[in-house]
Image (cartoon, rainbow, N blue to C red):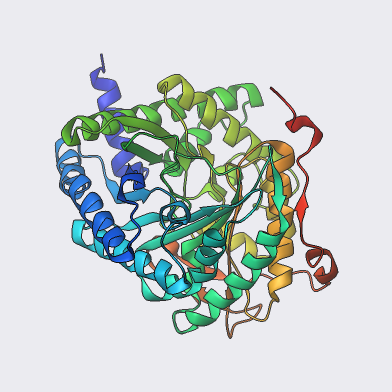
Amino acid sequence: MINLFEVNETNKMIEQENLDVRTITIGISLLDCIDANIDTLCQNIYHKITSVAEHLVETGENIEKKYGIPIVNKRISVTPIGLIGASVCQSTDDFVKIAKTLDRCAKKVGVNFIGGYSAIVSKGMTPAEKLLIQSIPQAMKETELVCSSVNVGSTKTGINMDAVKLIGEIIKETAELTKKQDSIGCAKFVVFCNAPDDNPFMAGAFHGVSEADAIINVGVSGPGVVRKAIQTAKGKDFGELCEIVKKTAFKITRVGQLVAREASAALNIPFGIIDLSLAPTPAVGDSIADCLTEMGLERVGAPGTTAALAILNDQVKKGGVMASSYVGGLSGAFIPVSEDQGMIDAVEAGALTLEKLEAMTCVCSVGLDMIAIPGKTSAKTISGIIADEMAIGMINQKTTAVRIIPVIGKDVGEKVEFGGLLGYAPIMPVNPFSCDEFIDRGGRIPAPIHSFKN
């Protein structure tokens, strides 16, 4: 039973500390939509998504009214389109046609984003998957709500460096095609190592083939709540600090569990997972960086930052798994730059560099996220940044990702404004030395020795 004190405590978290349910995401399998005719395939996709997700937005709004819990986004993820279009797509235009269909579906049912314009190529690319990857720039230009991802590596298979090289070129092309909007197309694309099948967060969401026909995944976020809790631990040792963060994460996850079960019952769709990810927003008081500075750092990026982030990430996961038997996705702490005012301030103060962010990704829940770099940065340098991050994921048996934005026409010292949850970002300097010869080797980096487990 929930007592009156806990009700009041939760209300305070919502009203004063920015606790929210970041997303209710319906994962939808499109395997039964596959057809040998592209027009029929698109019709099947449209009918499946708009029927399954017809009441998603309405259901989310009803739960908000019933419990007073803000639900910021309602989203859809689908089976990777690289699989769905494999038997019919003969050109990049065919894949773009599917992307436009997904965009129409998202607008019809009123969701914020739809994810799954994706390919899983960690060991190699089929001709269709290569076409999908090559179509990403045009798809991101011609759609508004479609998000894309590619998984290029895993601990079990190694890293597909042919895909990594290609994606550096694709990111540059996407930046060029959307340069009138400050290269925002790149903000809708992410490259992964060890991508999870049940991630509700964009741009990386897709509905894995191991999932049911439809599933409800809920993402909860509350960095403001965690920061407030950390404030109460001032002067206490690390053991007490960890207990406070863990208990707070437990309370946040219980809110997500409630929303997930309500949505599942209302939509008659099975509950999948709770993703407890401390995902910041540009709002004051809703910052991961502020959580870290409350631990005793002058700025994020100072010595001790990686250790502080490791504490936060681990205790969030421990609190989450105590609150729900089905914690999954990317649960932990996100460290995007543009979406976190504290991170932006640290970059502008010179405390936080790209190299320090890379070190922090060894212990956070994802990777290099929403980082703006000079538009003149070469495709192979971008591929090198991706390769470094994929290696961290592969060796450490964790999910890592890169969402990087070479902003065409802008350089270090300038800013780029994306608006909404994406916020704004200072253009960060990139190491000027070349990795061209390394990237041009191609092939596949083998899986590490500790991957051989049965």
Is any part of residue 418 visible from this angle?
A: no
Q: Is residue 247 left or right of residue 114?
A: right
- Percent position of residue 450, x then y: 77, 30
Question: Could you tell me which residue is drawn at 43 percent across and 64 percent down?
Answer: 89
Q: Is residue 203 left or right of residue 401?
A: left
Q: Is residue 186 left or right of residue 163?
A: left
- Percent position of residue 23, x then y: 34, 46
The quadrant where residue 349 appears: bottom right
Check the picture and name the quadrant holding the N terminus: top left
- Percent position of residue 355, x then y: 74, 58
Give the total of numbered labels: 0
Between 350 and 419, the one lying in front of the other is 419
Indicate whether 437 appears above or below 368.
Answer: below
- Percent position of residue 305, x then y: 69, 45
Question: Could you tell me which residue is drawn at 80 percent across and 74 percent down?
Answer: 432
Is any part of residue 51 visible from this angle?
A: yes
Check the picture and name the quadrant holding the C terminus: top right
Between 185 and 449, the one lying in front of the other is 449
Residue furthest top as drawn: 1
Question: Could you tell me which residue is drawn at 49 percent across and 70 percent down?
Answer: 135
Indicate whether 427 appears above or below 193.
Answer: below
